[in-house]
Amino acid sequence: MKVPGKHKEPTIAFRPSAWARAIIEQRVALSGIYKKDFITRSCVYSHISVVGKKENIQRVVDALQEMQMTMKEIAGQIQSGDFSLSDEGYRELKNDYLALVLTVVDIADGAAYLFEKDSPAERRNWKVELELEQYRHVLEMEERRDK
């Protein structure tokens, strides 16, 4: 049952300066897509710059260590046959870890110049390709269903 005023997904909001808002509004208008889609794509596909303070780097390390511990726990549960996770729990876990992995890769790409690797712009297309592959998969499922 859909409740009026309730949204399925939580809201992310921010208050840009007047100048930043004007730039965003112009870019949205010229992009031809909805503002929410423009902002989402801009955040997801943008270059990530991490300020090299020890605390910021430690957050990345902590997140990866937590992910490692969780994956070890899940592997142990699977091996013992004691792995029980609802479909919703599985989707949430998958989304959380996929987002973490994509973010860490983007951060590493952003720091690639430190290690004389390819620039982020040269490697960024892999996310677009991943998204396109997901769309292809959905379309194939719909085609099979319609037959």
Image (cartoon, rainbow, N blue to C red):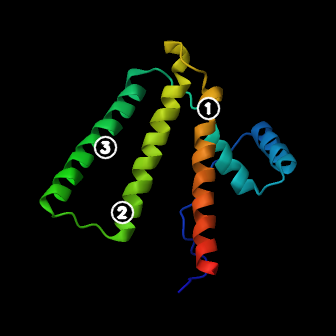
Left of 61 or right of it: where is 41?
right
* Mark 1 vs 2: CB contact within 8 A: no
Q: Name the residue under label 2.
A: 90
- Relative image position of residue 59 (x, y in whole percent): 37, 33
Distance between mark 1 and mark 2 Cα atoms: 29 Å
Residue nearest the observer in this picture, 72 or 144: 144
Which residue is rendered at x = 56% and y = 83% of the image?
2
The alpha-carbon separation of the residues under discs 3 and 2 comes to 15 Å
Q: What element carries label 3?
A: helix
Amino acid type at image mark 2 = Tyr
Mark 1 and mark 2 lie on one chain; the one further toward the N terminus is 1
The answer, for residue 24, to whether it is visible in the render is yes
**Toward which corner of the image does residue 53 lie, by quadrant?**
top left
Residue 67's disc number: 3
Of badges 1 and 2, nearer the viewer stands 2
Question: Distance between the Cα atoms at labels 3 and 1?
Answer: 23 Å
Answer whether labels 3 and 2 touch (C-beta < 8 Å): no
Label 1 environment density (alpha carbons within 10 Å; few <14, some 14–19, many ≥20): some
